[in-house]
Image (tube, coloured by chain):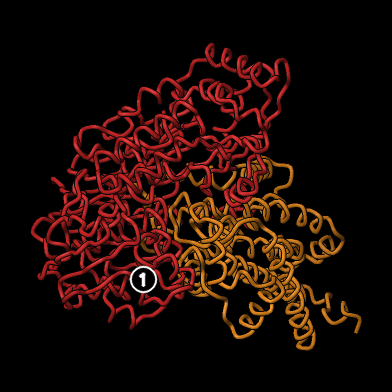
Chain colours: A orange, B red
Amino acid sequence: MTKYIIKRIFYMILTLFIVASVTFFMMKMMPGTPFTNQDKLSAAQLKIMNQQYGLNKPIWQQYLIYMVNLLHGDFGTSFQFNNQPVSSLIMTRLQPSMLIGAQAMIIGSILGILLGAIAAINKNTWIDSLATFVSILGISVPSFVLGVLLQFYLAFKWHLFPIALWNGWQSSILPSIALAVSPLAQIARFMRTEMVDVLNSDYIELSKAKGNTRWQTVVKHTLRNSLIPVITIIGPLTANILTGSLVVENIFSIPGIGEQFVKSIMTNDYPTIMGLTIFYSVMFMVMLLITDILYSIIDPRIRLTNKEGN
Amino acid sequence: MKLNKLLVAGATVLLSASALVGCGSSSSKAQAPKDTVRISEKDVIATMDSSLNTDIIGTQNLTNTMEGLYRYKGKDIKPALATKVVQPTNNGLTYTFPLRKDAKWSNGDPVTAQDFVYAWKRTVNPKTKSQYAYIYEGIANAKDITAGKKPVDSLGVKALDKHTFQVTLEKPMPYFSQLMASATFYPQNPKTVNKWGKKYGTNSKTLVFNGPYKLVKWSSANNSWTEIKNNDYWNAKDVKVKKIQYQVIKDASTSLNLYQANKLDRALITGDTSKQMKGSKGYGIQKQNSTFYIQMNQQKDTIFKNQKVRQALSLAINREQLTKKVLGNGTTPAHSFTPSNMSFDPQNKSKDFTSETAKTGKANATYDLAKAKKLWKEGLAETGNTGKKFNFVLLGDDTDIAKQQNEYLQNQLEKLPGMKVTLNNVPFKSRLSRSDNGDFDLVVTGWNADFPDPINFLTLFTSNASNNKGKWNNPEYDSLVNKSMTEDANNPAARWKDMVAAQNIANEQQGVIPLYQNGEAWMTHSRVKDLDYGPSGSYNMVSLRVKD
């Protein structure tokens, strides 16, 4: 297991290096400069600015400089936020996004699994139909529509929650719910399908034949076996949600990271683009690793080391 | 069934728990905090370092918390750290500012002439990497210093004594007083800047203030910040509002919800929200010093060298409809590329620059399709293109609102017989590169004033100006613009006449086609009084009042 994880981490670093390099060169191909008032600078002034920021050097040189700095843990400073280190920018803006994302994933996973399980157990009854209806609704209503509705009714009309702004934990509830609905629906659908399969399998018949109660059967044999595919999607979903949502964060005026990626690309804020790319990649790969480890815990038949051909 | 019930019960508990939690915060229509004004803001403050700031938001917050030589009050420039509005000597080349002796930084240091010398040299120093240093061009040696050709100490500034600051220019700058009211020319406290180095201006702990307010609880990654009255400000007695709270809100309906729940006193609204609220109580429009216009690429399409063709394009566009129905954002039709409500006749402050050029402006930039078709036909005949078909690429931005605007322009221009317009909506930076490279037929561009003087717009379209992407040129226009900056530079009345004449030529020629002047739509609570929006494009919060 340890050996496997070390190997995986080595591959992660390799992948990260490739991602960072490819992004760096693609980013440099984008037209324009990172200067916020580029439209006001004449060609001569632009040349001076490029010189001052070292952007007139050949791209391979800029690449080497960046990579060397990166190895020293220096992500550079942002162009949009003058002189603000990219790492501190990401850290500050990440906290609200992480809080909302984590809450959304907890709500989404728990309710999703519950909803899927209820639907499967009551297959082909009105409860099942209701659960399916909720899932379809959850997938088809985008989080920003839900966000606006929640804001209008729960906050604006009924004063149950703050309308927006970031003042304490209460501010995080509505955005968390808005974000939770999509993973909730997806997880519920997977859970239901898988659980229906499991419920039809022979060992469930055996469990019933042994005289186990329905409760025992479901908890001991069904739930656990149904979770494998669900965990497969929870990994990437979590990585996706923890990295913030542009729209939901805008609706609730949350100082999160969601918008920064788009904004940094639009403004050619090179250091921020790189910082966020690296950060997102790490996040995604770590989630995949955790998913794989969880597999082996939930289903002892899956041996990670075997998969690697040992 | 036991399990089933349990699961259902579990789900119910979870759902209701999350709903109940919120009940604690239940608040009916909030009471507005006393002596406080709460304002929405479009985006974060990128920096509070006056040497590095480039945007309107930074400028506004610097204007709130810092003080320069002058400050706008209404349309007028009033002395601030300078004790009077100074007239230049030495043929308009030397300005000697006597400074007030009672001005202090919030760390207790007095504000001295040396603080100006320090800040200005820091801005032009290439090491500071200021993106706005070009605005210093005209002050002795500034251009060469930013280009690294001369030492920083050669800048034409001097502290004659502790409270006398002198500036030497290379050429007369008739708009110098306007510049002196802008944030890029504010002084800095050397002790503080040196202490924090590169971190200066990245959060409120690294700052000291000499203006009406002090910024607290801010870092450049924050979505909200507070400004409290600075009791050490030399004119603190005129500052009546104790606290200003800013909140970044990017979604217009959120902004409106917060305003209606009395959580905001002044809320910026855009798009459909703005259209929907138009005419309701509290709704108002703030014109900005910024216009949008179409440039025609005369180098690529020689047909645009014909005046009638250019006029035809301009007359085919219905600006009323564009601003009211399509944009609906507080924009107003523009009849010239120089915006209105920005600059006024030096001899008669009630005369707006655009009202003096309104005749030519309106004649050539008001919707008249019949006349447009007639001129189009004549223009085609004059250039030997009768009956020919044209396919022009209209280059524009790819934001939602810009796309709608470009589609509208396409629709309007295609009413000219034989004219087809293909849209090319690209991100802002791509649009800049492509217009620099001349890779367009028509391009929608805008300009936001650096300082409130028509010359800032007129110099955009002289024949060798880098912003003149369409390469329209008119020798008479060039010579008038030049005359205003040289021969008539020290004669405000003659200079004004030159600029009016130049604008009239541009209007008649339609070298660029004006579209609209930018504006913002705001909902403002009746408790907020005396919002003092100056020609510089910022609010003077010294005048702000609140009535509870």
Taking depth in this image into account, of B54 and B442 the one nearest to the observer is B442
Check disc 1 and give the amino acid type: Gly
The quarter holding residue A238 reads: bottom right
Give left or right: position of A192 versus A111.
right
Q: Residue at x 56, y 16 (%)?
A: B375
Tell me the residue that label 1 is attached to.
B201
Extreme-left residue of the structure? B237
Give left or right: position of B173 versus A86.
left
Image: B456 above or below B515: below
Give left or right: position of A147 versus B255.
right
Q: Residue at x 65, y 44 (%)?
A: B438
Q: Which percent across, then down, holds residue B74? A: 20, 44
Taking depth in this image into account, of B441 and B192 the one nearest to the observer is B441
For the question of whether residue B108 can be seen, the reply is yes
For the question of whether residue B528 can be seen, the reply is no
Extreme-right residue of the structure? A309
Q: Which percent across, then down, holds residue B171? A: 34, 57
Taking depth in this image into account, of A194 and B226 the one nearest to the observer is B226
Q: Residue at x 75, y 88 (%)?
A: A2
Circle count? 1
The quarter holding residue B204 reads: bottom left
Q: Which percent across, then down, holds residue A300? A: 80, 77
Q: Which chain hosts label 1?
A: B
Image: B316 above or below A48: above
The quarter holding residue B285 reads: top left
Q: Secondary structure at mark 1?
A: loop
Q: Which percent across, then down, holds residue B337? A: 43, 36
Q: Residue at x 40, y 35 (%)?
A: B502
Circle 1 residues within 10 Å: few <14, some 14–19, many ≥20 = many
